[in-house]
Amino acid sequence: MLPILLKTLPFFALIGLGYLAGRVRFFGPEATAALTKFVFYFALSAMLFRFAANLSLEEIFDWYFVYAYLWACLVVYAIGFGVALWRGVSVEEAAVEAQCTTIGNTGFLGVPMLVVLLGPKAAGPVLMVLSIDLIVFSSLITLIITGVRQGRMSLGIFRVLGIGLLKNPMIVSMVLGLGWGATGWPVPGPANEFLALLGAAATPGALFAIGASLAGRGAERLAVAAWLSFAKLVLHPAAVAVAALVIFPVDPFAAGVMIAAAALPVAGNVYILAAHYGVAPQRVSTAILLSTAASVLTVTAVIAMVEGG
């Protein structure tokens, strides 16, 4: 495990550097927001487009992969939702907590780190995981919270969901990249170099931004946040492992990448959704902080197991 830890440590060291810069106010909230915006709309989008443009749809999409990941996610989501309701919280809070147990930081942490650690072949499975997280589960929490507040489902909700997906640069860049790849044309040399240069900024920029954003997070309900972190870092990858290795015939390498992606800490966009709806944002913030800190060891352990077969 030590050799894998030495490989993952630089990634988490970048997060730590961002956290330190944010903590001492050398890198304030405005700077963090600007860096995050640059990574989200430019660097990460360039990286995703380049990955997708050099892959065929067959290399990314596999029904057994989708079934396995969805089955595992829905099981853990139901556990998180049920535990929250058992504690007596509202349906809205239960939806947010369930989201914490299921949605990992695949965009800002998983894509840059797993492709480097597991090789270029990991790009397809990581993009598939990211797509399911963004399309299925970001939509699910919106449907639950909006449905509860309005007391019913309406066509307007689905219109909002559609517009939200169309405005998400990660979704747009992946779709455009796959569209380009489907033509069979290679990305022109200068354009490919441009995308490579811009995309190279995604890894350090995203990791630094994660750390800087964590610096401003306070702690609330540590026991609940610890449970959510445990569910995300342990239950989620365990459920994915059972689904991908036992229940569904997923390609072994793709299954390993899926399990590693499932081991990632709680995603920052869960906090964005919680803050947007005004539902337990501080609780989510604490879960992100705890799970990110603990993932130094848990992600390393899972990647070590994946690489060891």
Image (tube, helix red, strand yellow):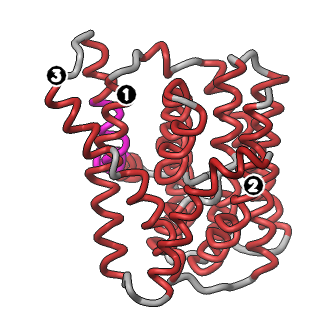
Give the Cα distance between marks 1 and 2. 27 Å
- Find out whether the residues at labels 1 and 2 contact each other: C-beta distance under 8 Å: no
Q: Depth check: give the residue in front, 143 or 299.
A: 299
Question: Which disc is residue 188 wearing?
Answer: 3
- The answer to whether residue 151 of the structure is visible from this angle is no
- The residue beneath circle 2 is 233
User: Number of labelled discs?
Assistant: 3
Earlier in the chain: of badge 1 and badge 2, it is 1
- The answer to whether residue 44 of the structure is visible from this angle is yes
Q: What amino acid type is highlighted by mark number 1?
A: Ala
Residue 43 in percent (x, y) is at 30, 50
Mark 3 burial class by Cα count in 10 Å: few <14, some 14-19, many 20+: few
Dividing the picture into quarters, in which one does residue 178 lie? top left
Dividing the picture into quarters, in which one does residue 199 lie? top left
Q: What amino acid type is highlighted by mark number 2?
A: Leu
Seen in the image, is 113 located left or right of residue 82? Answer: left
- In the rendered image, residue 198 lying in the magenta stretch gets the answer no
Residue at left offset 81%, top offset 53%:
79
Give the Cα distance between marks 2 and 3. 40 Å
Q: What amino acid type is highlighted by mark number 3?
A: Pro
Dividing the picture into quarters, in which one does residue 260 lie? top right
- In the rendered image, residue 166 lying in the magenta stretch gets the answer yes
Seen in the image, is 70 located left or right of residue 186? Answer: right
Magenta residue span: 162-176
Earlier in the chain: of badge 2 and badge 3, it is 3
Q: Quadrant of the N terminus?
A: top right
Residue at left offset 82%, top offset 42%:
238
Residue 203 in percent (x, y) is at 43, 51
Residue at left offset 81%, top offset 78%:
223
Q: Depth check: give the residue in front, 292 or 303.
A: 303
